Image (cartoon, rainbow, N blue to C red):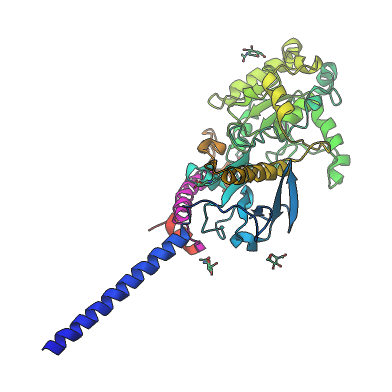
Amino acid sequence: MARLSLRKLFIFFLCLSAVLFLLITLQVIVELGQQHFGQCKPPGEPESEYPYIVWWSPLTGELGRLGECGTNKCYFTINKTFYSHPSTHAFLFYGTDFNIESLPLPRTACHQWALFHEESPKNNYKLFHEPVITLFNHTATFSQHSHLPLTSQFLESLQVLTSHRHLVPLTQKNKLRKMLAPVVYVQSDCDTPSDRDAYVSELMKHIQVDSYGQCLHNKDLPPLLRDSTAMEEQSFYQILAQYKFILAFENSVCDDYITEKLWRPLKLGVVPVYYGAPNIRKWLPNNRSAVVVIPDEPPEKLAQYLKRLDEDDREYATYLEWKLKREVSNLELVKELKERPWGVQDLTQENYIDVFECMVCNRVWENIDRQKKGLVPKSWQAEGNHLKCPPPKMFDFVSDPRNQTSLRGIWISSYEQSKKEARALRWLAERNRNFTVGQYWKEVFPD
Ligand SMILES: *[C@@H]1O[C@H](CO)[C@@H](O)[C@H](O)[C@H]1NC(C)=O
Ligand SMILES: *[C@@H]1O[C@H](CO)[C@@H](O)[C@H](O)[C@H]1NC(C)=O
Ligand SMILES: *[C@@H]1O[C@H](CO)[C@@H](O)[C@H](O)[C@H]1NC(C)=O
Ligand SMILES: *[C@@H]1O[C@H](CO)[C@@H](O)[C@H](O)[C@H]1NC(C)=O
Ligand SMILES: *[C@@H]1O[C@H](CO)[C@@H](O)[C@H](O)[C@H]1NC(C)=O
């Protein structure tokens, strides 16, 4: 009897210690995974003189380069094995290939994340939700709110706007109207979150539009241009410059998302009919330099307005007055171009990738210096508006469902799914352990 209870007691303690051991091991694993506490160890002997910054996307292709950013130096590499190096302070991501399949997790207190995403919101929707964008410490996006705004990335300079190089005089445009429509459209991406083709096809019922691209195509390019596989830009510009209006419709509707679709007509001296960034007026060279589409109004109304301008030279000319006077009256745009720290197709200025790298390098150094002085490190955090678009909306005047392509409407469900993905990714990132694709999808669709 006594021997039996002794054995029971022994087994009890054995189990207890096993459970305790398991609990302690688990705790250690969890804490290893969440080195959120404590300060980031500054680089220095014996590891490295410079902080390492790892491109988690192979955007630059550089296996290793000591970059100089003012007086600071950082070592930039795409070599992912530096993930575990104690001198690694930041990871740089390129939005379009920000991939959940291999993220640098666990993330330590040392690991700052930085996102470069200059692309259309079409690419990688899940980045456009607060749970994901706020995972990053530093951002460079088209949004004016980001840490390194790229809003004017498609505009080389103010000079190209005020230049008369391609300008076709109105008298000649009027003569050309015997052969050409008043409006031109050139697009080869026909199913987009902005649903632009639905609008344009409705507009085409009410005003003549020459469409040279694949979308709503109704006019071929001159044989000379058609033959050349790589359409030479200058001769294409000459064709566009003959028109009175160019439909400048972005593929997505987000504040500050502005592409060459807007700037090209302005350069050529053609009036853009713009649909895209709702806050476009903030960026126009002059508030009478573009016809801005009001999406809630019927395309027929827009067509009537364009026809009126087409028939009234004086009225039409008011939209080109700024160009003829070579006058950009929007001081915010002037300031933006003057103050942006990077250039476009300009060898005398840095490109924005280098500027982005240096922004992160300098911020990493700022905290290293603060820590050396015993100061609390600075904290950087992306906010929701660094990458934000309203949900895509479809125009409702496509009456004949046969005319819809199967892809139309995919953006709404794609956006809805990306919201779920964003929540799942946030949860997995906060759990701070690496995960498989399978685990990810199980988190996105729990049922
Ligand atoms: C990446 O770095 C590791 C360790 O420094 C090195 O052994 C490896 O050769 C590097 N990979 C490439 C492709 O250079
Ligand atoms: C047009 O721009 C001028 C200054 O450039 C401004 O004072 C005026 O309010 C603007 N008008 C509209 C309708 O936005
Ligand atoms: C970077 O962002 C993470 C996640 O929000 C945060 O925990 C960390 O403190 C930030 N680091 C810095 C240096 O701002
Ligand atoms: C829809 O398609 C039909 C033929 O399939 C065509 O006749 C009609 O003009 C189209 N309507 C629109 C709005 O494109
Ligand atoms: C997580 O990381 C460990 C160590 O780097 C690796 O062995 C393992 O395969 C990773 N697991 C997943 C799910 O990626």
The image position of residue 223, as x and y in percent, is 86, 41
Viewer can see residue 244: yes
Asked if residue 417 lies in the magenta stretch, the reply is yes
Name the residue nearer the viewer: 218 or 47. 47
* Residue at image location 19% in from the left, 83% down from the top: 8
Residue 211, quarter of picture:
top right
* Residue at image location 76% in from the left, 12% down from the top: 313
The image position of residue 386, as x and y in percent, is 56, 37
Name the residue nearer the viewer: 252 or 30. 30
Numbered range of the magenta stretch: 409-437
Residue 338, compared with residue 383, is above or below; it is above
Asked if residue 435 lies in the magenta stretch, the reply is yes
Question: In the rendered view of the protein, which quadrant contains the C terminus?
Answer: bottom left
The image position of residue 338, as x and y in percent, is 74, 26
User: Hey, which residue is sitting farthest front in the picture?
Assistant: 373
Name the residue nearer the viewer: 208 or 125. 125
Q: Main secondary structure of the magenta part?
A: helix
Left or right of 257 in this view: 269: right
Left or right of 150 in this view: 327: right
* Residue at image location 86% in from the left, 45% down from the top: 227
Left or right of 31 in this view: 12: left
